[in-house]
Amino acid sequence: MFLFIKNINFMANKSVRVDIPKNVEELLTLGEKIYQKHVADGNSSPLTTLQDYDWSVIGPNLVAALAKHDEAEGYEKKMKEAYETRNKLMGDIAGIVKATRDLLKGVNSKSPQKLGEWGYDVFDTPAPKKVKVA
C-alpha cells in the first residue's frame, strides 16, 4: 500500500529577511556582485525596471570605489602606526610641561609673565567658567 502526499511548501508562511550590510566594504562587494549579475543578464535583468536608480550609472564606479576604500584602509593603518610611534616617543610630555610650569611659577612668582619667554600662554584674567550642559 502506498500513501501519496502532495508536495507542500512549508516555507510559505515564514517571513524571509534579506540583510543589507552596514559595513562599507561588504556593501561595495555586494553591489559589485549585483552589478555583475545585472550585466550578465543584459536586457532580461529585472533591475532595468528600477525607476529611481540606474545600475548602468552606479555599477561601473563600484570597482574604483572599492579600490579607494582599500586605499583609505591602508592610510588608516599607517595613521594608527604613526600615532603609536608618536605616543612612545613623546613620553609623559603633559607631566613634564606641568611640572616645568609649576617650577617656573615658583621661581617667577612676582613676574609670572616671564613664563611667556618659555612658550607658555600667560593670561592676566581668570580662566572662563565652564558651562555645564544638561
Image (cartoon, rainbow, N blue to C red):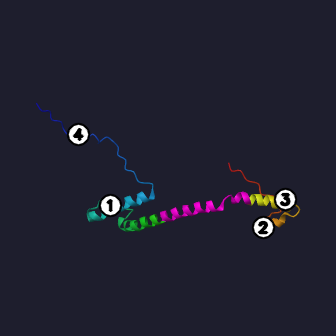
| Label 2 environment density (alpha carbons within 10 Å; few <14, some 14–19, many ≥20) | few
Which of marks 4 and 2 precedes in the sequence?
Answer: 4
Q: Nearer the viewer, mark 2 or mark 4?
A: 2
* Label 2–label 1 contact, CB within 8 A: no
Left or right, residue 105 beside residue 85? right
Q: Position of residue 128 (x, y in %)?
A: 77, 57
Which of marks 3 and 4 precedes in the sequence?
Answer: 4
Q: Quadrant of residue 93?
A: bottom right
How much space separates mark 2 and mark 3, taking CA atoms? 14 Å
Q: Which residue was labeled with disc 2?
A: 118
How much space separates mark 1 and mark 3, taking CA atoms? 76 Å
Question: In the image, what residue occupies the spot 63% across and 62% down?
Answer: 89
Q: Quadrant of residue 86?
A: bottom right
Q: Nearer the viewer, residue 90 or 129?
A: 90
- Secondary structure under tag 2 reads helix
Q: What residue occupies the far top of the structure in this picture?
A: 1
Question: In the image, what residue occupies the spot 41% across and 57% down?
Answer: 26
Q: Which residue was labeled with disc 3?
A: 106
Whether residue 50 is visible here, answered yes or no, is no
Q: Which residue was labeled with disc 4?
A: 8
What span is colored magenta in the figure? 72-96
The three-letter code of the residue at mark 3 reads Gly
The three-letter code of the residue at mark 1 reads Leu
* Label 2–label 3 contact, CB within 8 A: no
* Label 4–label 3 contact, CB within 8 A: no
Q: Nearer the viewer, mark 2 or mark 1?
A: 2
The three-letter code of the residue at mark 2 reads Trp
